[in-house]
Amino acid sequence: MAEIENAAPVYSFENPPPVKNYPLYWWHIFAKIMSFTLFGIGTILISIVAFPIMKLLFWKKERFRKAGHHFISLMFRFFVCFMTVIRASQLTAVDKKKFRALKSSIVVANHPSLLDVVMLISLIPDADCIVNSYLMGKNIVHIIASNLYIPTSLSFDEIMEKCTASLKAGSNLIIFPEGTRSLPTGQHRFKKGAARVALVSGCPIVPVYMGGNDKRGLRKHDSMFKYNTRHCYHYEPHMKDPVYPENYKDLPSHAAARRITAELTEILSDKNNTQYVTVYQ
């Protein structure tokens, strides 16, 4: 009985340990607010200054989209460096050269936090993605999203057409098959969208597991004033072996999509990637 009472508490992403260093914790909160402020200012400047100039230089729509993808990747790289300098976050990618070399690939990743897409686009120079239709609203972000990326508000056939055209043009397509950010208690069920795009386009799927530590404060519905109780946010993306749609060509399309999605679920499940997750000590 005494051993049970004296046992060390078990901490997890749902039950974090208490804050040990409050000055450092509040600095992380301040650094997070600084980062989001810079992101907002950068979005405005890109929308009202950079994009009009780029449209004059690259007046053909496809050339503009290509240049825009590379420009946003460069800006996100700067943003990631800024967050690293002020100790808001840290990105450790052992496969940087592989990310840079990707072409006409469907990048499928788990989605533990708000900044996953920022980290991936910073690593992939020519990255397209399917964005939630709410980003196409009246806020300033819609100027970037509507010019460069594919909205979910389109019909299924239109999305397939645009995804295939983007991949055939050499761009990479980032998809989060959960459709939204993961819960602290586990992942959502993977949707079949990535598999369907792969089967239509014939392009390979490159699974990427977004490892690292607890993203408290960047999860769904988290407050701005929440943060990892011990460390700055650490992102550790790991590229897995590609999944090729031609391996399923003998199956009916719906069965092939189901099998590919099941394979991706297995590859990117949290339980099979515990070595990439930093747990609380």
Image (tube, grey):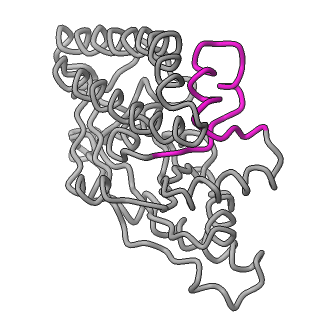
170 or 228, which lies in front?
170
Q: At which x and y percent is residue 78?
A: 27, 26
Please tell me whether residue 217 is drawn above or below residue 165 in the rendered image: above
Q: Quadrant of residue 200?
A: bottom right
11 or 173, which lies in front?
173
Residue 145 magenta-drawn? yes
Q: At which x and y percent is residue 163?
A: 64, 54
Residue at 63% across, 21% down: 142
Q: Quadrant of residue 82?
A: top left
Q: Could you tell me if residue 15 is visible in this image?
A: no
- Tally of numbered discs: 0
Residue at 69% across, 25% down: 136
Residue 259 magenta-drawn? no
Viewed as shown, does residue 142 lie left or right of 32? right
Viewed as shown, does residue 127 lie left or right of 221? left
100 or 220, which lies in front?
100
Residue at 69% across, 79% down: 256
Please tell me whether residue 126 is drawn above or below residue 97 in the rendered image: above
Please tell me whether residue 247 is drawn above or below residue 129 in the rendered image: below
Looking at the rendered image, the quarter that the C terminus falls into is: top left
Q: Could you tell me if residue 241 is visible in this image?
A: yes
Q: At which x and y percent is residue 206?
A: 44, 64
Residue at 41% across, 14% down: 42
Instruction: Give the residues drawn in magenta, as a range.
Output: 127-153
272 or 129, which lies in front?
129
Q: Quadrant of residue 197?
A: bottom right
Q: At which x and y percent is residue 232?
A: 24, 27
Residue farthest along the bottom direction in this orientation: 250
